[in-house]
Amino acid sequence: MNEIMIKVYGAKTKCPSCVSMPSAKETLEWLEAALVRKYNDKPFVFHYIDIEEPPQGEEEMAADILENDRLYPLVTIQDEVIAEGNPRMKVIKEKIEAL
């Protein structure tokens, strides 16, 4: 079974529309705990991507988030955007189960 890559993009400072929501790092921790518990047979790989200082290979997505005023945390699964802002577990589970 191939690894399921989940990335959470965010910044130290929350986006203006997201001040009442968890931070990107908190979102990553919540997703990791919930998904590993529910799907303990699936090989997840989780990454936090700081959009203000993106690692090599993530510059394009970070620029897209910043330039297009996308909400973050932004969650991708297998490089497909699944959620912006406050992620919904139902949508995330549907994507994982479709893989």
Image (cartoon, grey):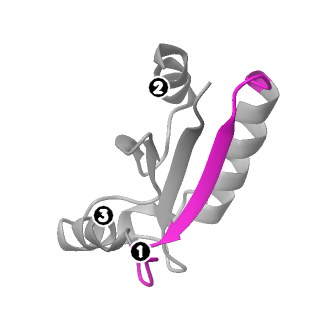
Residue nearest the viewer, comparing 10 with 40: 40
Q: Which residues are magenta?
A: 38-56
Number of the label disc, if any, that sits on residue 51: 1
45 relative to 70, above or below: above
Which of the two residues, 91 or 61, is positioned nearer the viewer here? 61
For mark 1, give the secondary structure: loop
Q: CA distance from mark 3 to mark 2?
A: 21 Å
The kind of residue on which mark 2 rests is Val
Residue 46 magenta-drawn?
yes
Question: Residue 79 lies in what quarter of the image?
Answer: top left
- Mark 2 crowdedness (10 Å alpha carbons): few <14, some 14-19, many ≥20: few
Name which of mark 1 and mark 3 comes first in the sequence: 1
Can you give x and y, in whole percent of width and height, for residue 88 in the image? 51, 33
SS class, disc 2: helix
Image mark for residue 17: none
Q: Above or below — where is 29 with respect to 94?
A: below
First of labels 3, 2 by sequence position: 3
* Residue nearer the viewer, 15 or 1: 1
Residue 91, labelled with which disc?
Answer: 2
Mark 1 neighbour density, 10 Å: few (under 14) some (14–19) many (20 or more): many
Residue 74 picture location, percent across and down: 42, 54
Residue at (50, 79) in percent of width and height: 13
The answer to whether residue 23 shows anywhere in this view is no
